[in-house]
């Protein structure tokens, strides 16, 4: 067996942070390769490089023995590589057949006229192949999520590729559809098609693959035939031990605990790293005073029967893999998405129909995961962004007339508190700031409201290490000051370093809860993956 | 250099002044007292209308129905106040009640537009376009396409006497300016226009803000109707039929963004001056009405191009 696809020393950095380190991996022809790794291990980046969406900083790829350097997705398609993504890339307003053949409609001779009968016949053939019993002229928006996934697969197959990459293909499939899909994969494998299969469901990967590869922190930590692996070994490999990373939060929380009320601005990362590295986080112990009580929160297909309490002075972590429903849960708490059942109480008082404005008045704040879409007005000034949430406090009742002096004072104060870069003028648009500083603006905006309960959704995503460090510090300061923080993160290290308790979500359900002394990477990951944890 | 100049806030004001200086020698009577007084008088209602448009544009919407609202308000005010058949005829309260009636009509129609946009999630363009068609029809239907004379003298003075009209329009413009720049509601309007999703998450009551913006635009349209009707001393269903282009042109030329989030009353004021200067000088140069609209069309296109270019540069700078 010769290698159909070969990665040689692929390296990629985002803003100085390495996300792929020297990946060398061969995919032999006719083999199904299972690729596993935690969120952020580098799977998507590697696949984006394969698909021509990203270019590697170093290293090269060969395809069928020849150098392969795709300039874009079209090159990958031309080479015969097809992708089935987790997020669907279909046009809901077009029919199934149109989606399948959008870039290569069968035509009547040389005329730019679609050969409708050929189109329907071709489409029907591929739909039968994937086991979808819908007429090809059906509009995609009328299909259920699972059926759309099958259309996506049919589209990949219809280009008759030599390699198909599946990225979490079964997340939206029902059990029956999954069985059909696996049968299809077996047929494809029997036909000698080369496949790469990415999934968090380890049983499936083990069942379907001939070979397995494990990525961790951007490095390939294991690669070999399926027989060498079992679930336990995979989990251990995925978790590993990461000693090379700086996770200041642990030391830092202890330090802030020792100096309650110490103003930000004196201790820098260097100093904090030297501080007592004791494992005991926050010498301030969380209280039993519930700030936020969630009881049986349910929306079918998204979250199911979620109940937990967030206490004053506590940092509560919420871990889960992509699609576990963490962000959706947070958005429901803040009234941005509806729920069907369940109740929310804030400081003992029921919050019947949460809305952002009402939640704010009750002392709840919510930093969303995507700062550009939900967090910032990029063209507006730093000062306007910071002030938006708390304008009411500086406005006269009725007229809304703003007290510009107190407003400016508040903005100045929060700029210092979050240590926003001093070089940027208040009137400069937020767009001109770096990612880390932009995130500080969002956090500052919410901190100005002095929330009792602070919900943070992936607050450190896409920001540099220094800014991360400062955000950790701000978070533990808040908890020390008596607020409750619900911290949603995909980074286990971050949660372990910062939290008093960690909740684990899988497929819309809370599946595990750990207190600080029992934090255990393997147990958390096992719970988040599809396995019973030994509680 | 060019960029800084094009991005400058007072670009339009400078262009207007340069145009004025350039045109003065060629245009007889441009600087004459009557002409300037006349320009000022007709400029005021346009300014008031454009202020309303500015508010709506800042939210990322558009109000095409403003001029039709003006016509309806004018006609209803005329029907109520005229000395022949109006139910307020002869009453000492005719003017204040009539004025309040007109303002209320404008605000209600505007609020209706706002509700359609905010609560039914309809595109502002469609809502106000159909509003324009419906209400301009309604104005004609109400009067059987006749104009209404014999309005109270006190009412006519509001728009016709220059100092009074200046005070009314200037006061309204100032109020809008302060409202936008110095109140919480103003900040909410900009936040909505910049990023509606972010504004929602930040607790801005989007529905109320949107309804308020359109209601204010309707109210200001009615105020413009008061000024125009007083000037002409007649209420007419055809009032402001050709004004919509001027209103949007003045606002956009001033620098208010069609994409939302950017806009100021001062910019709009300079846009209004620009349009009026263009109008008046081409008029004095004996250009036909059609030439005038052609020139205006080009000017508006240039302004929209400038807006899009600015935006592209801003995005490229990220």
Image (tube, grey):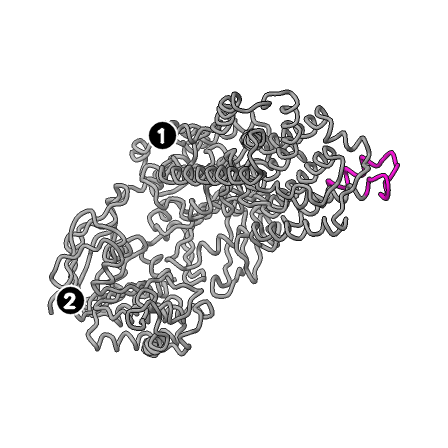
Report which residue position mark 1 lands on: A267
Query: In the image, which residues are magenta?
Result: B80-103
Q: Residue at x 45, y 62 (%)?
A: A509
Name the one closer to the observer, A331 or B8: B8
The chain under label 1 reads A
Report if the CB atoms under discs 2 and 1 are less than 8 Å apart. Answer: no
Camera-side mark, 2 or 1: 2
Helix, strand, or loop for circle 1?
loop
x, y (%) of residue B202?
A: 53, 43
Q: Residue at x 64, y 44 (%)?
A: B241
Disc 2 crowd, CA 10 A, few/some/many (<14, 14-19, 20+)? some
x, y (%) of residue A383?
A: 48, 32
User: In the image, are marks 2 and 1 on the same chain?
Assistant: yes
Name the one closer to the observer, A204 or B157: B157
Disc 1 crowd, CA 10 A, few/some/many (<14, 14-19, 20+)? some
Above or below residue A254? Residue A197 is below
| Residue B161 colored in magenta in the image | no
Residue A481 visible, this angle: no
x, y (%) of residue A463?
A: 34, 42
Count every numbered label the image shows and give the total: 2
Above or below residue B256? Residue B38 is above
Report which residue position mark 2 lands on: A28
Helix, strand, or loop for circle 2?
strand
Residue A68 visible, this angle: yes
Above or below residue A155? Residue A240 is above
Rendered-image quadrant of the C terminus of chain A: bottom left
Dot 2 or dot 1: first in sequence order is 2
| Quarter of the rendering containing residue B32 | top right
Q: CA distance from mark 2 to mark 1?
A: 53 Å
Name the one closer to the observer, A7 or B23: B23
The chain under label 2 reads A
């Amino acid at each position: 067996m010769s290698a159909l696809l070969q990665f040689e020393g692929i390296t990629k950095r985002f803003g100085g942070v390495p996300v792929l380190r020297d990946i060398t991996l061969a995919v032999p022809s006719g083999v199904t390769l299972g690729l596993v790794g935690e969120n952020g291990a580098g799977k998507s980046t590697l696949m984006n490089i394969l698909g021509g969406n990203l270019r590697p900083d170093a290293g090269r790829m060969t395809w069928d023995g020849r150098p392969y350097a795709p300039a874009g997705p079209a090159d990958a398609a031309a080479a015969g590589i097809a992708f089935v993504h987790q997020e669907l890339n279909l046009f809901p307003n077009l029919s199934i057949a149109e989606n399948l053949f959008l870039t290569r409609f069968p035509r009547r001779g040389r005329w730019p006229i679609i050969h409708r009968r050929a189109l329907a016949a071709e489409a029907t053939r591929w739909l039968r192949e994937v086991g979808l019993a819908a007429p090809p002229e059906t509009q995609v928006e009328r299909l259920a999520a699972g059926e759309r996934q099958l259309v996506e697969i049919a589209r990949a197959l219809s280009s008759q590729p030599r390699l198909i990459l599946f990225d979490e293909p079964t997340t939206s499939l029902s059990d029956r559809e999954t069985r059909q899909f696996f049968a299809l994969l077996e047929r494809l494998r029997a036909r000698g098609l080369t496949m790469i299969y990415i999934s968090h469901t380890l049983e499936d990967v083990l069942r379907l693959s001939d070979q397995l590869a494990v990525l961790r922190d951007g490095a390939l930590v294991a690669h070999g035939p399926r027989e060498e692996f079992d679930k336990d070994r995979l989990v251990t490999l995925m978790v590993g031990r990461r000693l090379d990373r700086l996770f200041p939060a642990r030391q830092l929380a202890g330090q802030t605990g020792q100096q309650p009320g110490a103003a930000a601005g004196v201790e820098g990362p260097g100093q904090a790293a030297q501080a007592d590295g004791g494992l005991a986080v926050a010498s301030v112990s969380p209280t039993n005073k519930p700030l936020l009580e969630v009881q049986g929160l349910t929306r079918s297909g998204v979250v199911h029967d979620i109940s937990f309490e967030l206490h004053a002075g506590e940092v509560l972590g919420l871990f889960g893999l992509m699609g576990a429903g963490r962000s959706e849960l947070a958005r429901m708490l803040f009234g941005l998405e509806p729920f069907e059942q369940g109740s929310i109480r804030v400081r003992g008082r029921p919050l019947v129909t949460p809305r952002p404005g009402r939640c704010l008045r009750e002392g709840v704040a919510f930093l969303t995961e995507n700062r550009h879409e939900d967090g910032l007005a990029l063209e507006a000034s730093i000062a306007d962004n910071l002030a938006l949430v708390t304008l009411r406090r500086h406005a006269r009742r009725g007229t809304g007339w703003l007290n510009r002096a107190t407003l400016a004072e508040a903005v100045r104060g929060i700029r210092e508190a979050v240590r926003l870069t001093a070089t940027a003028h208040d009137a400069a648009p937020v767009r001109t700031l770096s990612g880390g500083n932009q995130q500080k603006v969002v956090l500052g905006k919410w901190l100005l409201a002095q929330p009792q309960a602070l919900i943070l959704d992936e607050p450190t995503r896409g920001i540099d290490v220094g800014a991360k460090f400062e955000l950790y510090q701000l978070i533990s300061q808040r908890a020390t000051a008596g607020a409750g923080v619900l911290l949603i993160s995909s980074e286990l290290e971050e949660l372990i370093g910062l939290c008093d308790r960690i909740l684990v979500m899988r497929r819309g359900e809370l599946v595990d809860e750990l207190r600080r002394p029992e934090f255990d990477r393997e147990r958390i990951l096992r719970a988040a993956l599809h396995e019973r944890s030994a509680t | 250099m060019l960029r800084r100049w094009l991005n400058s806030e007072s670009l339009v004001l400078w262009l207007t002044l340069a145009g004025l200086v350039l045109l003065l020698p060629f245009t007889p009577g441009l600087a004459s007292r009557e002409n300037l007084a006349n320009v000022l008088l007709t400029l005021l209602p346009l300014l008031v209308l454009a202020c309303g448009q500015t508010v709506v544009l800042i939210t990322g919407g558009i109000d095409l129905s403003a001029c039709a609202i003006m016509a309806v308000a004018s006609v209803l005010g005329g029907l109520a106040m005229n000395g022949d058949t109006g139910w307020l005829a002869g009453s000492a309260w005719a003017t204040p009640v009539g004025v309040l009636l007109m303002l209320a009509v404008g605000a209600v129609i505007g609020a209706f537009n706002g509700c359609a946009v905010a609560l039914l999630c309809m595109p502002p363009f469609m809502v106000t376009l159909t509003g324009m068609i419906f209400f301009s029809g309604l104005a004609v239907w109400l009067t059987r396409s006749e104009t209404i004379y014999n309005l109270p003298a006190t009412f006519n003075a509001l728009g016709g006497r220059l100092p009074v009209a200046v005070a009314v329009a200037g006061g309204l413009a100032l109020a809008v300016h302060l409202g936008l720049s110095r109140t919480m509601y103003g900040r909410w309007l900009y936040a909505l226009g910049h990023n509606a999703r972010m504004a929602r998450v930040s607790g801005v009551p989007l529905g109320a803000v949107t309804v308020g913006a359109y209601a204010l635009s309707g109210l200001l349209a009615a105020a413009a109707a008061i000024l125009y009707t007083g000037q002409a001393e007649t209420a007419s269903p055809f009032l402001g039929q050709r004004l919509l282009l001027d209103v949007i042109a003045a606002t956009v030329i001033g620098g208010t963004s069609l994409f939302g989030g950017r806009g100021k009353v001062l910019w709009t004021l300079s846009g209004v001056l620009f349009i009026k200067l263009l109008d008046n000088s081409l008029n004095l140069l004996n250009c036909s009405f059609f030439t005038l609209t052609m020139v205006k069309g080009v000017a508006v296109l240039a302004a929209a191009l400038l807006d899009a270019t600015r935006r592209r540069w801003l995005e490229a700078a990220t």
